[in-house]
Image: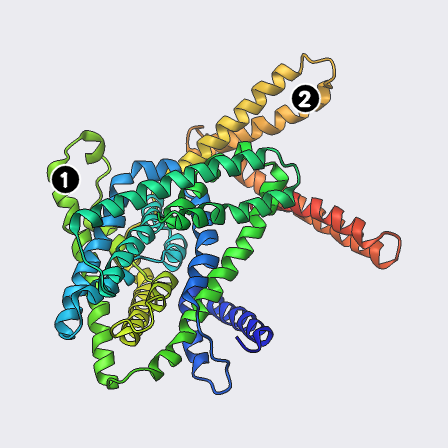
């Protein structure tokens, strides 16, 4: 690729400018990045960018999957395992079949295997924009967990189906038993490789004290699982997901506080840049794709709208029919208690946005593949229709349906804070008998944690507030405002000392970092 340095600079400038604009317009940044990429692609003089699909699947997918799985809740995934499995497998296969039938009917000369390959291309979801909207609108945490869980697994389902269909299209034969067996092998093999990688990564992390090395190992963890799985012919996607889930679930025992702080900051920046660059690159592909089309604009637009409508309709139909079939077969009380109404299910259906994985799969179609240029164009149409169309209407749909966050997660937080504070108070009482402790220190710390205990209990409603009682939450906020003012004063004093030449920049950076860490603990 020519002028790589200029291209990288262009991408960074474009990502920064478009993200700032997205924040000003209060639009999820993936939507504006795609639209901005399309607009920039038509500007004369803008470098032509060809997105290497192998680079996307190899360089971008493992760290993004690892990060998403690392911060996923194993408890919530386990609780909704059936819903997630039905979505991640059932919707993928239903979408693949529905799109194949519609596309073959619209383009009769298109071979069935090619139509099914395209159906697999547009079946996996990209949760980034949907989750960003859902969290901003206060969607219940359970729905967010299902959206995340589905996206963690459906990439593997779609890519396995994609590989089978492409193999048939380029001269192979299809056998249902072989396809089912191959799918089971990919799933079991991917999970097994992920578990082995998790053990290896955990063993390494336990023996490292340097936070920088911890972050480095975590960066490589997704690749440690993904690459061997792909070489063994099993699902690298599931392997990366499993190592992320296992490592994230045990992060407390595998890393130090310093490593966790540095790791969180590093991953926030890395994941943002990877996603942002990917969405801009998706938009930049459209001008080049249009150059290779030999159909009329009207025909292309019509096919694009037809395929996008099919993708959306299949998901809506599945979400509003499959649960009733399952309910008729499974009437266990614990499952009955977890049932939701049609409004949350509608939001789950509307959250099926497509993204970079679909485009990478389309671009990975081999040269000479029947109607390859058309399939790539239609993939971009589906991404635009779901990411932009559904993404922009998602907030309005949430408001119209009136689905609000449930108080359960917040009460869980208060419960955790209350019990942690009680554990600290009990431990301090035990430490009071130790000869090396000071009574005034124990009294001060005990008073602090007893206040935290009562504040959490009061906010959760477990501690009755009588007339004239002090609002402990307001008292805490007043204390925090005072503390932040003091921290700001200390930072200013340190900078003044540096400007006067009395202390070095190294000393100032170290002390300011300590103040910043204390500042981050504040809620205001």
Q: Position of residue 493 (x, y in %)?
A: 79, 52
Q: Kindly identify the residue that appears in the image at 58 percent across and 28 percent down.
A: 449
For the residue pair 302 and 516, the one nearer the viewer reads as 302
Give the side of residue 143 with respect to residue 428, left or right: left
Name above or below for residue 286 compared with residue 454.
below
Say which of 416 and 108 sits in front. Answer: 108
**Residue shown at the point (17%, 52%) measured from the top left:** 175
Displayed quadrant of residue 172: bottom left
1 or 2: mark nearer the eye: 1
Compared across the picture, whether 255 is left or right of 83 comes to right
Secondary structure of the residue carrying tag 1 is: helix
Packing grade of label 2 (10 A; few <14, some 14-19, many >=20) is some
The image quadrant that residue 25 belongs to is: bottom left
The residue nearer to you, when weighing 377 against 265, is 377
Element marked by disc 2:
helix
- Residue named by callout 2: 442
- Tally of numbered tags: 2
Q: Is residue 443 something that shows in the picture?
A: yes
Q: Is residue 25 left or right of residue 332?
A: right
The x and y percentages for residue 195 are 42, 37
**Which comes before the other along the chain, label 1 or label 2?**
1
**Inter-mark Cα distance, 1 to 2:** 56 Å
Vertical comparison of 103 with 452: above or below = below
Give the residue at mark 1. Answer: 327
Percent position (x, y) of residue 294? 27, 85
**What is the crowding at mark 1: few (fewer than 14 residues within 10 Å), some, or many (at least 20)?**
few
């Amino acid at each position: 690729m020519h002028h790589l340095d200029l291209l990288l600079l262009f991408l960074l400038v474009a990502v920064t400018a478009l993200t700032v604009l997205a924040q000003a317009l209060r639009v999820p940044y993936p939507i504006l990045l795609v639209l901005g990429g399309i607009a920039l692609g038509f500007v004369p003089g803008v470098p032509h960018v060809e997105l290497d699909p192998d680079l996307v699947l190899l360089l971008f997918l493992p760290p993004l999957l690892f990060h998403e799985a690392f911060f996923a809740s194993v408890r919530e995934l386990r609780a909704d395992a059936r819903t997630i499995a039905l979505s991640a497998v059932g919707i993928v296969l239903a979408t693949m079949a529905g799109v194949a039938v519609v596309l073959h009917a619209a383009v009769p000369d298109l071979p069935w295997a090619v139509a099914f390959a395209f159906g697999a291309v547009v079946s996996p979801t990209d949760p980034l924009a949907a989750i960003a909207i859902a969290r901003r609108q206060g969607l219940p945490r359970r729905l967010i967990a299902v959206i995340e869980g589905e996206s963690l697994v459906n990439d593997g389902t779609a890519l396995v189906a994609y590989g089978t269909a492409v193999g048939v299209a380029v001269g192979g034969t299809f056998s249902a038993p072989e396809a089912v067996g191959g799918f089971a092998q990919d799933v079991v093999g991917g999970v097994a490789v992920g578990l082995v990688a998790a053990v290896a990564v955990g063993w390494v992390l336990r023996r490292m004290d340097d936070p920088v090395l911890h972050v480095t190992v975590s960066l490589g963890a997704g690749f440690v699982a993904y690459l061997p799985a792909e070489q063994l012919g099993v699902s690298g996607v599931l392997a990366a997901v499993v190592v992320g889930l296992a490592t994230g679930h045990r992060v407390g025992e595998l890393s130090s506080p310093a490593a966790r702080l540095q790791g969180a900051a590093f991953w926030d920046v890395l994941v943002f840049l990877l996603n942002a660059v990917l969405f801009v690159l998706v938009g930049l592909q459209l001008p080049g794709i249009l150059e290779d089309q030999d159909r009329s604009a009207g025909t292309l637009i019509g096919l694009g709208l037809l395929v996008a409508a099919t993708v959306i309709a299949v998901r809506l139909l599945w979400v509003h029919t499959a649960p009733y079939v399952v309910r008729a077969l499974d009437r266990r009380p614990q499952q009955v208690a977890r049932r939701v109404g049609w409004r949350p299910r509608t939001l789950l259906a509307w959250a099926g946005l497509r993204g970079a994985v679909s485009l990478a799969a389309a671009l990975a179609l081999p040269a000479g593949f029947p109607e390859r240029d058309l399939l790539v164009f239609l993939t971009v149409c589906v991404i635009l229709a779901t990411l932009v169309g559904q993404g922009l209407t998602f907030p309005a749909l949430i408001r119209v349906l009136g689905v609000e966050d449930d108080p359960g997660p917040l009460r869980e937080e208060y419960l955790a804070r209350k019990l942690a504070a009680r554990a600290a108070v009990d431990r301090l009482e035990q430490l009071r008998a130790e000869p090396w402790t000071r009574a005034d220190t124990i009294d001060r710390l005990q008073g602090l944690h007893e206040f935290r205990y009562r504040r959490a209990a009061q906010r959760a409603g477990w501690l009755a507030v009588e007339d004239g009682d002090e609002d402990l939450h307001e008292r805490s906020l007043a204390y925090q405002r005072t503390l932040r003012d003091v921290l700001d004063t200390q930072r200013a004093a340190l900078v003044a000392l540096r400007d006067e030449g009395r202390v070095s920049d190294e000393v100032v950076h170290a002390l300011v970092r300590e103040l910043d860490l204390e500042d981050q603990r504040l809620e205001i």
